[in-house]
Amino acid sequence: VTVPYKEKIIPFLDFLNEESKITGAVNTIAKQNDKLVGFNTDIFGIESCLNNQFGDTNLNNVVLIGSGGAARAALYVLLNKGIDNLTIINRTKSNVEKMLKRFSKFDCNYEILNFSDKNEVKIKSIESELKDVHKKLDDIEKKQEMMNKLYQLDQDKRKKMGELPSTHIH
């Protein structure tokens, strides 16, 4: 089952597994004991990919784009992994708010950005990139200072040992 039927199919099913109940989306239907049961196998695929990529590493900061069935499956997996901070980008803020109500039992800091916040997204992106650049520049300057000090100590030591003339220019 795919878009746009992941949600629309639910009223026609007899049962939903627990994940499908929470996410409100079904992408697989199985007949069990003459009953139609809905499953969300996106969860297993996303979980497998995250585990392969990150293992047991705690995901501190995550950006999730969208609020549809696949996004809800991803959110389910991420919240079960125990993420700390989440930014959700979507066209419609109210859809994100509805999605988050489904996951209210989980504890996570989140921020919602919709496409009308394009300038905010760009500014945040630029600000974070600039912070990274400034940090790298600071690190480079500190390393350069240290190298200069080490070079000067080496030169002073060589002068004392008579290896360099006292008028050596570098």
Image: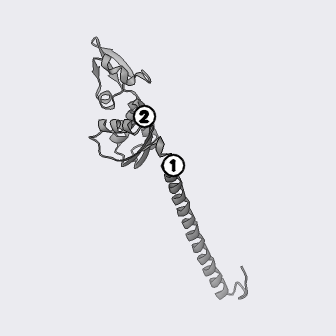
Residue 115 on image: x %, y %: 48, 41
Residue 133, picture quadrant: bottom right
Residue 28 on image: x %, y %: 38, 21
- What amino acid is labelled 1 in the image? Asn
- What amino acid is labelled 2 in the image? Ile
- Answer few, some or many: residues within 10 Å of disc 1's Cα (few below 14, many 20 plus, some between 14 and 19): few
Applied colour scheme: one colour
Along the horizontal axis of the image, is 110 left or right of 158? left
Q: Which of 75 and 114 is in front in this view?
A: 114
Residue 170, picture quadrant: bottom right
Query: Nearer the N terminus, badge 2 or badge 1?
Result: 2
Residue under the point 71% across and 84% down? 164
Residue 62 on image: x %, y %: 43, 45
- Answer few, some or many: residues within 10 Å of disc 2's Cα (few below 14, many 20 plus, some between 14 and 19): some
Residue at which label 1 appears: 119
Residue under the point 69% across and 87% down? 162
Q: Which residue lies furthest to the top in this view?
A: 34
74, above or below 158, in the image: above
Q: Which mark is residue 46?
A: 2
* Alpha carbon distance from label 2 to label 1: 30 Å
Labelled pair 2, 1 in contact (Cβ < 8 Å): no
